[in-house]
Each structure stands twice: as structure tokens, then as C-alpha cells.
Image: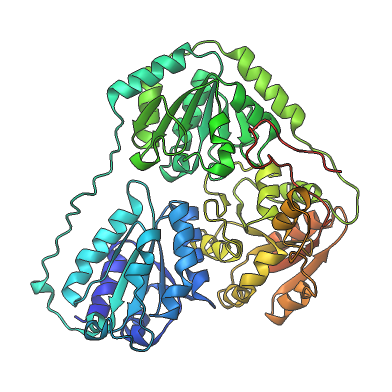
Amino acid sequence: MKGSELLIKKLKENGTDTIFGYPGGVLLPFYDALCESDINHILVRHEQAAAHAADGYARASGKVGVCLATSGPGATNTITGVATAHMDSSPIVLLTGQVATNLIGKDVFQEVDTIGITMPISKHNYQPRSADKIPEVMDKAYYIASTGRPGPVVIDLPTNALKEEISLDNIKPNTQTPGYKPTTKGNKKQIKKAIEIINDSKKPLILAGGGVILSNASEELIKFAKLTEIPIATTLMGKGVISEEDPLSLGMIGMHGIQSTNKALTECDCLIAIGCRFSDRSVSNMDKFATNATKIQIDIDPAEIGKTIKIDVPIVGDAKITLNEFIKEVEFPDRTNWTKELTKIRQNSVENISYDEVPLKPQQTIKELMEAVTPDTIITTDVGQNQMWMAHYYKTRKPRTFISSGGLGTMGFGLPAAIGAQVAKPEENVVSIVGDGGFAMVSQELATIKENDLPIVVCILNNRYLGMVAQLQKLFNKHVYATKLTDTPDFVKLAEAYKLKGERVEKPGELKEAVQNALKSREATVIDVVINPDELLPIVPPGSRLDCMKTEFH
């Protein structure tokens, strides 16, 4: 068996049914073998999109997403996607081509040090220099990518390893991973201490992050919250751990979070943080974050415990397992007043107003979108104002249905992530909410959507600006400079150029109808939503305490 055929064998053994890729010279042996297999290959139009699509696939399905790029510029084009997955703990495996081992280090055509480049932005990386190392490396890569705190693993494949023939009888893979043993069960003494604090607290609050979704612990989280009557706030990555229509849900905290939720965080006397890393966009001023609270942090990655916020009770362990321990031991004191107070404030603060204005307000577009989709609809967003409007106003109702680039904040993520999500969940509706800036970075992927007949609905919130940067300039700088997008293309005609349906929305009521029709038709549609460029997001000014949110602008 050739190394390339062995690679296909290991991909299938590890459950891979789809690869997002772009071919190149050193990968020709692999593509020969791939052509003879039943693995689905999605040809993207840029390698960065392959990495984002694999990421979207992983987030929607919970399985490892796989992407592929050739050596040199192919590999370097995936770097932003790898860093995006790394920051958000998304399990992907990136296969990159590499020049033959005897040529490595000699600066031959399309050679680059992929291992050196990806080391700081991946969970691990490998370079199997002969065919007999491929099985060992592949099994380890999938295991490392999907266990503990998930993340991207890079496998750099010299072309000679793909061409080499080897007898399977001669392969004795070593699948041991010394030094990598994730702690899944929390320390019993620490759990006991945490439970005592929770039982004694009068105003506890749960802060749920993306780690709860990654460990598939939403059910346990909701059970724990309902037994103890503790409200749940989330980070951006935690959206969907609980339905945001549930009375116990307070919505998102942070720089662009819900004002009442930020206020609750400053008033709570016990903060139970589960699977979140206290990023700067979530906590704002780290010295003034939840100063009244005893802080309990549950995280599977010990490096995240106390990294940015001083923690009183650290627990290293898996969210699902730890929550089950909490459920067994915790008492159920009466916290009706605290919970009802927060629920009432939250309900009163959430706008459910129709805006009969032209240009459209973003709030109105999201209200109409909510009315057009179901709880199972998978939403992907890009990065910028479009992302934060969705995070702030859109009510996510199920885990793995709100997919967004959190840590790296990658413009251009939304559209290719939607491709991955749709491939992972072919029966579900997928809607990608993007800005005109981010969409322009990856609009070539409309060809991928067309070629693979993917019924994705793309809504471009078009304000002719790089909106988030322009907002920060308006509020905190002297000049609004280099952020106006002049000569924006006609996105309807662009969609039609790719033989897709294009539509423009400018008035209240039109978006709901357009999205409903597109979803019903199961036909890929690009909707250009013309919105008010002067509308600004609620914001906590940099360095301010979370409850000092600015919501009115003059």
C-alpha cells in the first residue's frame, strides 16, 4: 500500500467523510488515492476557506473537521483559519503537503517551514517523514484534536511519504501520547468547597462559555441551574448552552453584552464560571470584574485557571462530569427573589420593538430574521457589527446553532463556516449573517456553494462601512478614516454572476419574507440588506467596569 492510500485508510478509520481542500503539486499522490475513495472532497476557492469550513463543520457536528492544502502558499493561506480554530478550541485536522524530506531546508519551490509557522497557533503538529509513520501520526492527531481542550492539529506530509510503498505487516504504530493526559474529573475537595460556597450564597450567577458546548454539557448545565434557581449568563462562545428564551437565561455579558446582565455580574456574590476563559471582551476591566463575588472556575485546561482573573476555587475538569458531581451534592435553597429580580430586569430591558424606518435598523432586521427561522436553524456570523448585533439581539435556542469567530475575530469567517456547517448538517437550514466588508474577503466561495448545491442563505448587513472600526473611531478617536467602503459592488448581480439567486431588501417586512422564501425553496440565496450606517452598538468603553455601558449616542 502506498503512503497516500494508507492516509485515506486512516482518515476513514477516524470517521472522516468529508475533506475541504485545494490541490497542489506535492499532493498529487494523495489526490490519486482520494479519487478512488468514497470520502467527499469539497473544492474551496481559497485555502483559508478550507480551514474555516472544517471549523464550521466541527462546531456544527461536534466531530473533527478536516482540511487540506498544498505546500508553501497553500499552507500559509490556511494559517488564519488554524489560528481561528485554536483561539476558539475547535477540533480540526489540517493536512498540508510538503516537499520531499531530502529537499527540506533547501528553499526549493513552494517550500515553507509549516511546522515552525503553525507551532504557536496549533494544539500540536506532526511531520511523518516516511509512510510507516502515517498511521501513528493520524491516530494521535485525531485523539489530541478532539480530547481535553479541543484544538487544531497540523500534519505536514512530505511528498515522498505519500509515494512510498509499504507492507502493512511492517507497521507497528506507537499511539502513546506521553505528557498528554487531560484531567477530566475535578478534585473532590475542591468540588466540595465550591458546593459549600454555592449553598451559602444569596446571589449566585453561572457564567457559561464555549467549553460547556464543547463537552456537550448543556443538559447538565440546565438541570443544575433549574435545581438551584441560579440564572445563567453566557460569553459569546457560550450562546446556545441554554435557550435565550428560557426565564433563567440572562443573555450575553461583555463589551457588547446585555446591560442588565453586565449589571447582574457586578452584583452577584458567587460566580460559577464553566468553560470560559475570561477574555478581555467578556470582562472589560479585569481589576473591577465581579468584585463582590467569590469566584469558582471550572475548566479542563489548567492553563486557563486564574490566567486573567483571580480565582477563589479552581476546579480542573470536564464541564459535563463536574456538573454531574455538582448535581449530586448541591442543596436547593430558596433564591426566588434574586432570580425573579434578574428575570424581570432582563425581560424589561430586551427590546421587542418594530422599527418602521428606512434605511433599516439592524435591530429590525434581526427581529425579522428571528421570525423567519426555527430553533434548529444554524446561524454563522462574520466579525464586526454584524456579529455583535446578532450576539446582542438574536436569541439562540440550541447549542451548536450559533457559530462565530470569538477569540481571533476573523473577518471572512462566516461564509466558509456556513459551508462547513451545511455539509455537516445537510438536513438543517443554515443562514450566514455577514457584513459587506467581511463578505468581500471571501465572496469567491459562492462558487463552492453553487458547485455543491448547498442551500445556504447569506444575509449581507450592508452599511457601506467597516462598521465596528468606524464606530470605535466615531466614539473614541478624532477621525473616521479608511473605514468607508466606497464603490461597493452590486451584491445581487455578484450572486447572479455565480448563478445564484440574489435579492435586495430595503424596507421593514421584506427580510422576513425573503428569508422564509429562500429557506422554503432550499435554494442558495444572497440577500443584500441595506441598513442604516449611523446605527451604533451598545458598548462598554475600553477599561471601564462592565456595568458602565454606553447605550445612547449623540
Toward the left, the furthest residue is 170
Q: Position of residue 420 (x, y in %)?
A: 51, 63
Q: Position of residue 82 (x, y in %)?
A: 44, 63
Considering depth in this image, is 314 or 97 the residue closer to the camera? 314
Quarter of the picture containing the N terminus is bottom left
Q: Position of residue 434 (x, y in %)?
A: 67, 60
On screen, residue 479 versus residue 307, left or right, reads right
Say whether residue 305 is visible: yes
Answer above or below: position of 257 versus 102.
above
Q: Residue at 64%, 60% (x, y): give it.
A: 432
Q: Which quadrant of the structure image shows residue 520?
A: bottom right
Say whether residue 16 is visible: no
On screen, residue 469 versus residue 165, left or right, reads right
Q: Residue at 63%, 25% (x, y): give it.
A: 264
Q: Residue at 87%, 46% (x, y): give it.
A: 355
The colour scheme is: rainbow
Toward the front, the furthest residue is 478
Q: Position of residue 480 (x, y in %)?
A: 78, 59
**Count of numbered tags:** 0
